[in-house]
Amino acid sequence: MKKKLIVVDKDTGEELENIDFTGGYNISLTNIHDGGNLRFIRKLDNAKYGSRHWIKNYTYRSIADKLVEKFKELEHIKTKSILFIEDMEWSLGSAKQPWMARIKKANKELESMLGYEYVLETRNYYIERMSTSQIIGLLYHELRHIDKDGDLINHDIEDWGNMVATLGKDWASTQEVIQNILDDDFMHWDEVKKAGRQVDMFETLRMVK
């Protein structure tokens, strides 16, 4: 789809910018009367991000929106504050930390200039080997790191035990078949049983940050 960005001086009618493009956009603007604070119009979709990453907002934000809408424990999350990127070149090799996905706070420059508070990064090496249900589960898992105060929290068996109890301890495995948590017939999470040996999520999810 071809798009055009035109900036016009409203007082004189002079055309200041006339740009044709086909991708997404992230516009920063400011007004003197409100203290010069940057405002953002964000609609980035698929675009190159550095030398090896691609922006995946178009693919993953729509899933994140559905997760936030469905699950009460995610209702405080503003998905537009998250930049979704994917490493397209990483491979397993002899990597010491083979995580599948991770979420982190955006640095001050990225937050100030583009308006994103978090960066959720995935690795295409794993994504292309996963089912849609697993990818949805992976995004849910990463969104759970954002608490109600906007801080990032670590894994907690009490918080993520619902995934193990419901989807199985190997839900992140590329060979595992799991239920799609966005399906209409998925109604609620099960809970890890307190009796006996507690499931060790850190063993089964060692590749998920």
Image (cartoon, rainbow, N blue to C red):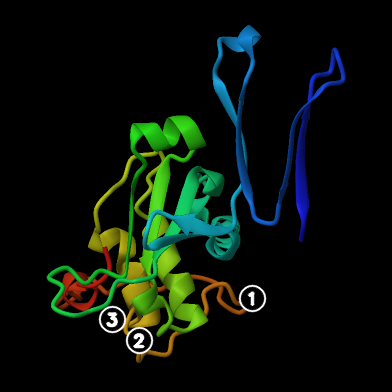
Identify which residue, 12 or 54, lies in the foreground: 12
Spatial CA span between label 1 and label 2? 24 Å
Compared to residue 60, the image places residue 72 above or below, namely above
Judge whether residue 73 can be spotted in this image: no
Q: Which mark is residue 169?
A: 3
In the rendered structure, which amino acid carries the disc numbered 1? Answer: Asp
Identify which residue, 76 or 84, lies in the foreground: 84
The percent coordinates of residue 4 (x first, y second) are: 77, 45
Residue beneath the point at 47% across and 40% down: 116
Which residue bears the numbered disc 1? Answer: 184
Spatial CA span between label 2 and label 3? 13 Å
Q: How many marks?
A: 3
In the rendered structure, which amino acid carries the disc numbered 3? Answer: Lys
Element at label 2: loop
Image quadrant occupied by the C terminus: bottom left
Mark 2 closeness class: few <14, some 14–19, many ≥20 residues within 10 Å: some
Element at label 1: loop
Judge whether residue 139 can be spotted in this image: yes
Compared to residue 29, the image places residue 196 above or below, namely below
The percent coordinates of residue 120 (x first, y second) are: 40, 55
Where residue 92 sits, quadrant-wise, is bottom left
Q: Earlier in the sequence, mark 2 or mark 3?
A: 3
Which residue bears the numbered disc 2? Answer: 174
Identify which residue, 167 or 39, lies in the foreground: 39
Are dots 1 and 2 in contact, CB under 8 Å?
no
